[in-house]
Amino acid sequence: MGTNSPTVTLKADSMFHRSSVRFVMCLAGCLAIAVTFAVEPTPAPKKKPDVGFYATTQDVVEEILRLAKVGKDDVVCDLGCGDGRFVITAAKRHGCRGVGYEIDPKYVKIARESAKKQDVEALVTIHEQDIFTVDLKPMTVVTLFLLPELNDRLIPQLEKLPKGARIISHEFDVPGLVADKELTFVSKQDESEHLLYIYTTPLKKKLAK
Ligand SMILES: C[S@@+](CC[C@H](N)C(=O)[O-])C[C@H]1O[C@@H](n2cnc3c(N)ncnc32)[C@H](O)[C@@H]1O
C-alpha cells in the first residue's frame, strides 16, 4: 500500500464518530419504507434495508479506491451502493467496470441517473438486489459501508472472490476476518476520522474462541 497519502495511524477518538454513524445508519434504515410511502413516488423496498443510506464523503471514496489500487481491468462492486458514488467514481477515474447492488429503489434510480449524467453508463451497472444474494465471483474489488454484523454475514460470499481481490470496509470491520491493514483517513469534507479496513483474498479467518 502507498504511504504518501493523508492516511494516518488509528486513533481512538474516532469511536464517537463511529457510534454516531451506526445510530444514523440504523435510524435511516427504519425510516426508509415509511418515508418512501409518505413523500416519494418510487416504490418501497421489497425487503426492509438492513441499514439505511448514509453517504461516504467523496474524498474517502477516492482514498478507498486508491488504497485498493484500482485499475482499468478491475471490476469494482459496492454492496449497498446508495447513490452509486463508489462505482461511478471507479469508472470515471480509473476507467473500470463498476457494479452496484442496492435494495432501495429510490437510490437505484438516483444511482442509474447519476451514472448517465456523468457519462459512465456503459461501464456502470446498478442492480436492485439484496446484497446477501449476490454472486461475487466476477468482482476484483469490493467496497463496504455496512455494520459489522452485516459484514460478517457476507463472509461466505466474500470467500468466492478470485485470488488477489481487495475488500475495503469503511468505518466498520469484518469481525470474523483478520484485516491486512487498518487505517484512519481524515476527510477534508466532514473533518472527521474515517476507519478503513483492508482485506485481500485468500481471506484470513479469525479462529473461533
Ligand atoms: C450506509 S449506506 C452506504 C452507501 C454507499 N455504499 C456509500 O458508501 O456512500 C448503505 C446502503 O445499503 C443499502 N442496503 C441496506 N440493506 C441492503 C440489502 N440487504 N441489500 C442491498 N442494499 C442494502 C441501503 O439502502 C443503503 O443505501
Image (tube, rainbow, N blue to C red):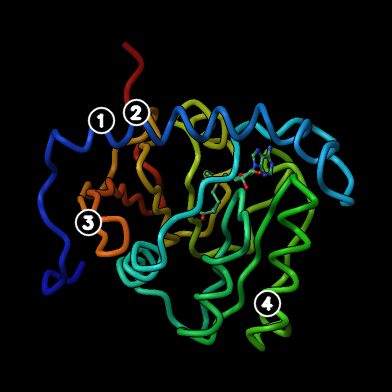
Name the kind of residue labelled 4 in the image: Ala
What residue does disc 3 label? 185
What residue does disc 1 label? 16
The disc label shown at residue 19, or none: 2
Find numbered disc 2 in the image and state the secondary structure of the residue it sits on: helix
Find numbered disc 4 in the image and state the secondary structure of the residue it sits on: helix
Q: Relative to the observer, which residue lies in front, 86 or 42?
A: 42
Find numbered disc 1 in the image and state the secondary structure of the residue it sits on: helix
What residue does disc 4 label? 115
Provide residue 99's location: percent of width, then percent of height: 65, 65
Callout 1–callout 2 Cβ contact below 8 Å = yes
For residue 97, side relative to residue 168 (left or right):
right
Total numbered circles: 4
Provide residue 3's location: percent of width, then percent of height: 12, 69
- Cα distance between the residues tagged 4 and 3: 26 Å
* Label 3 Cα crowd, 10 Å radius (few <14 / some 14-19 / many 20+): many
Q: Quadrant of residue 50?
A: top right
